[in-house]
């Protein structure tokens, strides 16, 4: 093992270990409030009690998603360790990326590069759902390793084995979360830019070295597609790819989206912060354009930059569902583009660029930490507020004169409540649900949530609300008397059913459904 | 100067070993450290300071010595656990370094000690906050006692012998079950001396003499102390403080041997199949390496080794061997002495620690690798299990407290509830919700304190019902005085009473509040009421 790492130049020395430790501590500090307050998202309710199986991700085509959990924690979502392991992998992944990009090695430079990249508020988007935190942060390590190894194939005598290993890295990550493809190409684009500018490589040389990377990614993508077909996953709601005919039209559309990402604000990434990132990006891009290379080369460099920026929207380009400005997708795309900008500043000459890089990354790291803490405070307040309402609803049900704890009720939740936004006073142009608005008490998790802490299980999980449950009394109640929580008429119960009304819009929708079922 | 620098480097390296194990232990239980969760006996001790005499009722006269010395008798969040973890990790460090005398390199030493300290036997110790610190500290006291007695054997010094005896007596005075650690460590040491240092039977016996003297003296004095305390009515006679008779001791040898072996295979909550398989593998490798070493020895040596291993197996359950067989007690059935995780905490981690070092110190590289791999796997399993326990503990505590809040809300919103009255609360039944968050494995047994006991006990209802109340509304006591039984109460108890959360699960009058929490509790209360045979004429 040691010899392999040595051959690949991946054996960490004392400085590297120091870099890992400092960066790991900074990243953990940025998300400390999350690690210490065990909060979980609305998909986690059952997983957190039971365990994640290897097959748990199959329904959405993520067939490798829970391999890290099964291997490391026997499928358990464990407080603190979930984050610690995820951040450890992310730290090492970013260290490999720094080596891949040949960032000037210094303790401060590497620490800033890694810490800045990992603490960007995009990372928060993986912390809402605890069941995927570990795996989705681990994919960054595998992806970076795949890229790093692919680059070394050209000069290695073990071309076949290295290719297999790299393909495996890409394949596993694609099977865990397909939008990681953004990271493959953003990082590859970054590598091409760095090699083209700083290492003065010709186009031919670039092709010679990186053809393996592209080939490995393509093979992994094909294998991924074949695996999906073989698995034939049911209920795959977010894997629908765009038809070839539509792709040319979508190219310009996604290029525009990619460029707009420099300016679009989302929760916890507000105007000032985005402007700072844009300034850093602008200086990094112009720095490379003014770098002493032949003028004829500059046109291709500009194309490389445009291509790299475009690849941040690669997923949006390839799939039908709208994925633009979604932070968990941008985590693998735009997040790495900003990281590239930081890395370039730390590598550019004259030295003034590097000093500026250290300055701006220090400022941005502080802003990242501030944004993360603000977000986590709001998440905690929202989490507590929503669960307090859940407690009150449980109490209301238990105190209901008709309630029998030994009975099995069919349950329906009308609407939901998202209280995180109540504690946020910032402004944004595009709302990212994972960062702010998705509720903890999701409509489809109502029954599991209701029984999470209760001593008895009184919900029939096999049968949903049936059309025959809509008796004239039920119909009358919801048409005329029902009101959202906390009104006394927000909880309805008879001998068969329990219905809870969370909000007015949910109630209006429910009334529309009821009209179609009018007894 | 060079020597001074070398000393600094050695100190640094030594500190690294115990700091690593301490940090691993802190990480394994960090959710418990940062979320202040306490057990069902802690409600009052959390508010009131523990006194030096608080443990006398169970004969544990030294139980609060360290808590008094270090934290002024207070149970303090974070500190309580951190100090306990620190003392425990130092104990295992001292044991391996200064008692077993293993001067193994930094990395394997850190790995082995970290693995041993994080073994999930500790989870039961962490349930009751009021004894956590003391139960963890006994490991260090015993380690020091062992080192002192070893010095006594080496230098023939009475002073060291007395020192060892005093420390042992203080430790078993705080929790007699910790004797397991003393005996297990001695057995391990004797095996080590016999195999590694090739001591003859006679020399081995000579080595064992000071330990035996201390053991007999300490146990004898403990028995005298128990008798004295009971005579003065300061101590209750409990099922786990009654000593077995000499005849019982002989009769129990086969069953204790069996229990010692079963300890490697018996599945209990949080001591699951993977964990047990790894510790069995470690012990099996240990036996294999003993056989390998013994090949060069005579048949006599082999029989000495076999005897020592049998004694070692008994020592793992030494406290259960010394305890009287009293299966009438409910606790003895729910939490039998031979399967008590709390006493296993003082033996199995010590054995595994010794086994890992012993295997690693063999010449064979394969054995070294096996010990390393097993330790790494066990460490990962330990951390996972400890955190899983923490999660279950956290969820169970939250769930039961939420239920408590709903019960209090219902009780206090009863029209008959008077704000200034003091009620006797009769809670029929208990609900434990930790099990709701635990995935039971096949053949899982016991786990009374690690999983099943609730955070609130019906006989100390006043402690937790008053805990968050602006003013006390529940008084001590759980019995209904026959003269206080009204027609309404009788009606409730005999006909109306239903279990929680039914509207008729709660009854309130001017003096009493009755909460029927579970069907079992309700049945028991019904039967008790029937036993009173009170004629309707006597109702008020």
Image (cartoon, rainbow, N blue to C red):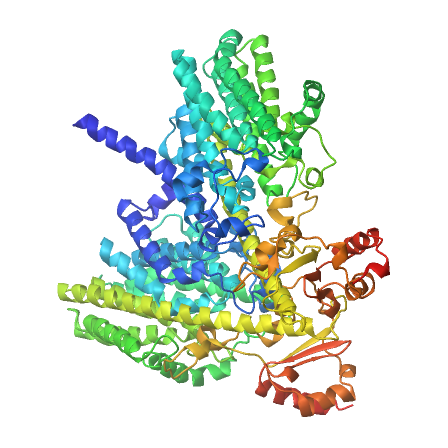
B450 sits left or right of A180 in the view = right
Q: Position of residue A308 (x, y in %)?
A: 33, 72
Does residue B78 sit above or below B297 in this rendering?
A: below
Residue located 58% across and 37% down the image: B57
> Quadrant of the image for the C terminus of chain A?
bottom right
Q: Is residue A98 above or below residue B254?
A: below
Instruction: Identify which residue, A130 or B530, lies in the foreground.
Output: B530
The quarter of the picture where residue B433 lies is bottom right
Question: Residue B85: x, y in percent?
Answer: 44, 41
Question: Exactly how many numbered labels are in the figure?
Answer: 0
Q: Residue sitting at 62 percent across and 74 percent down?
A: A393
Residue at 52%, 7% in the rendered image: B202
- At 51% across and 77% down in the image, what residue appears? A418
Q: Is residue A440 visible?
A: no
Please say if B268 is above or below A59.
Answer: above
Whole-percent x and y of residue A426? Answer: 36, 80
Asked whether residue B165 is in view, the answer is yes
The image quarter in which residue B333 lies: top right
- Left or right of A437 on screen, residue B272: right
Q: In the figure, B241 relative to B148: above or below?
A: below
For the residue pair A15 and B135, the one nearer the viewer reads as B135
Residue B171 is situated, as x and y percent measured from the top left of the image, at 49, 30
In this rendering, position of residue B514 left or right of residue A326 = right
User: Which residue in the rendered view is the most extreme toward the top?
Assistant: B202
Q: Which quadrant would the N terminus of chain A be assigned to in this image?
A: top left
Pick the front one: B277 or B504:
B504
Image quarter of residue B509 = bottom right
């Amino acid at each position: 093992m040691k010899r392999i790492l040595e051959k690949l130049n991946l054996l960490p020395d004392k400085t590297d270990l120091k870099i890992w430790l400092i960066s790991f501590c900074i990243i953990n500090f940025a998300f400390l409030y999350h690690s210490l307050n065990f909060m979980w998202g609305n998909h986690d309710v059952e997983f957190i009690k039971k365990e994640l199986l290897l097959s748990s991700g199959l329904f959405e085509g993520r067939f490798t998603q829970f391999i890290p959990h099964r291997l490391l924690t026997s499928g358990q979502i464990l407080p603190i360790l979930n984050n610690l392991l995820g951040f450890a992998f992310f730290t090492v992944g970013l260290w490999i990326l720094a080596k891949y990009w040949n960032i000037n090695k210094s303790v401060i430079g590497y620490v800033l590069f890694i810490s800045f990249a990992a603490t960007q508020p995009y990372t928060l988007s993986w912390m809402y759902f605890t069941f995927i935190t570990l795996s989705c942060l681990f994919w960054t390590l595998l992806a970076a390793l795949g890229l790093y190894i692919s680059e070394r194939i050209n000069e290695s005598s073990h071309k076949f084995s290295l290719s297999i290993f790299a393909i495996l890295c890409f394949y596993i990550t694609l099977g865990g979360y397909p939008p990681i493809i953004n990271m493959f190409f953003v990082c590859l684009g970054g590598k091409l830019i760095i090699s083209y500018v700083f290492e003065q490589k010709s186009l031919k040389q670039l092709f010679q070295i990186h053809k393996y990377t592209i080939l490995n990614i393509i093979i992994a993508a094909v294998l991924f597609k074949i695996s999906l077909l073989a698995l034939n996953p049911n209920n795959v709601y977010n894997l629908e790819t765009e038809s070839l005919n539509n792709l040319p039209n979508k190219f310009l559309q996604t290029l525009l989206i990619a460029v707009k990402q420099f300016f679009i604000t989302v929760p916890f990434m507000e105007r000032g912060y985005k402007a700072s990132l844009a300034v850093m990006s602008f200086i990094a891009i112009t720095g490379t354009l003014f770098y002493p290379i032949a003028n004829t080369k500059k046109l291709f460099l500009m194309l490389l930059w445009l291509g790299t920026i475009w690849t941040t929207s690669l997923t949006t380009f390839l799939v039908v569902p709208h994925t633009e400005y979604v932070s968990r997708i941008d985590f693998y795309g735009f997040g790495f583009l900003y990281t590239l900008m930081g890395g370039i500043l730390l590598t550019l000459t004259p030295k003034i660029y590097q000093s500026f890089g250290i300055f701006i990354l220090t400022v941005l790291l502080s802003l990242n930490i501030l944004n993360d803490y603000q977000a986590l405070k709001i998440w905690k307040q929202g989490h507590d507020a929503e669960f307090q309402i859940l407690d009150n609803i449980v109490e209301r049900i238990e105190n209901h004169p008709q309630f029998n704890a030994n009975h099995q009720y069919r349950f329906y939740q009308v609407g939901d409540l998202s209280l995180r936004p109540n504690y946020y006073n910032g402004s944004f142009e595009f709302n990212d649900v994972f960062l702010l608005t998705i509720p903890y008490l999701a409509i489809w998790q109502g029954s599991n949530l209701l029984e999470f802490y209760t001593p008895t299980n009184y919900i029939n999980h096999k049968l949903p609300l049936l059309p025959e449950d809509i008796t004239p009394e039920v119909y009358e109640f919801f048409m005329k008397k029902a009101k959202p929580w906390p009104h006394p008429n927000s909880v309805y119960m008879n001998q068969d059913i329990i219905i809870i009304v969370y909000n007015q819009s949910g109630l209006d929708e429910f009334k529309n459904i009821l009209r179609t079922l009018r007894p | 100067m060079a020597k001074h620098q070398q000393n600094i480097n050695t100190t640094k390296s030594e500190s690294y070993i115990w700091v690593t194990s301490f940090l691993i232990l802190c990480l394994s239980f960090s959710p418990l450290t940062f979320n202040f969760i306490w057990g069902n006996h802690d409600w009052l001790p959390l508010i009131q300071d523990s006194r030096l005499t608080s443990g006398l009722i169970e004969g544990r006269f030294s139980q609060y010595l360290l808590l008094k010395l270090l934290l002024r008798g207070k149970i303090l969040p974070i500190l309580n656990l951190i100090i306990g973890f620190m003392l425990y990790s130092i104990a295992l460090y001292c044991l391996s370094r200064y008692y077993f005398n293993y001067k193994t390199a930094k990395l394997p030493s850190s790995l082995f000690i970290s693995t041993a300290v994080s073994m999930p036997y500790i989870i039961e110790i962490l349930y009751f906050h009021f004894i956590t610190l003391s139960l963890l500290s006994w490991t260090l006291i015993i380690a020091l006692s062992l080192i002192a007695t070893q010095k006594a054997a080496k230098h023939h010094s009475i002073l060291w012998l007395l020192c060892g005896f005093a420390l042992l007596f203080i430790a078993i005075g705080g929790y007699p079950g910790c004797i397991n650690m003393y005996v297990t460590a001695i057995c391990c040491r004797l095996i080590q001396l016999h195999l590694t240092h090739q001591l003859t039977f006679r020399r081995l016996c000579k080595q064992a003499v000071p330990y035996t003297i201390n053991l007999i003296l300490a146990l004898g004095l403990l028995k005298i102390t128990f008798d004295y305390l009971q005579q003065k009515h300061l101590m209750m006679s409990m099922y786990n403080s009654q000593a077995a008779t000499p005849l019982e001791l002989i009769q129990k040898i086969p069953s204790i041997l069996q229990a010692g072996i079963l300890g490697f295979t018996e599945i209990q909550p949080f001591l699951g199949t993977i964990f047990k398989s790894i510790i069995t593998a470690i012990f099996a490798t240990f036996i294999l390496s003993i056989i390998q070493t013994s090949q060069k020895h005579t048949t006599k040596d082999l029989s000495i080794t076999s005897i020592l291993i049998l004694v070692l197996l008994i020592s793992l359950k030494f406290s259960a061997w010394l305890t009287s067989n009293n299966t009438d007690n409910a606790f003895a059935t729910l939490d039998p002495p031979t399967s008590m995780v709390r006493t296993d905490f003082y033996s199995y981690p010590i054995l595994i620690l010794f086994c890992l070092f012993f295997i690693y110190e063999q010449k064979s590289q394969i054995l070294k690798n096996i010990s390393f791999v097993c330790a790494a796997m066990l460490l990962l399993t330990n951390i996972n299990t400890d955190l899983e326990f923490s999660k279950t503990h956290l969820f169970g505590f939250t769930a039961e407290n939420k239920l408590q809040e709903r019960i209090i809300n219902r009780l206090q919103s009863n029209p008959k509830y008077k704000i200034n009255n003091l009620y006797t609360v009769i809670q029929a039944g208990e609900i434990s919700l930790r099990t709701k968050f635990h995935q039971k494995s096949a053949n899982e047994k016991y786990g009374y304190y690690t999983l099943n006991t609730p955070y609130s006990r019906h006989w100390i209802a006043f402690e937790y019902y008053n805990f968050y109340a602006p003013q006390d509304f529940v008084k001590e006591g759980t019995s209904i005085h026959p003269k206080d039984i009204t027609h309404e109460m009788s009606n409730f108890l005999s006909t109306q009473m239903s279990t929680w959360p039914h509207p008729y699960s709660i009854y309130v009058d001017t003096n009493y509040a009755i909460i029927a929490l579970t069907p079992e509790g309700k049945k028991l209360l019904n039967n008790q009421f029937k036993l009173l045979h009170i004629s309707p004429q006597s109702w008020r």
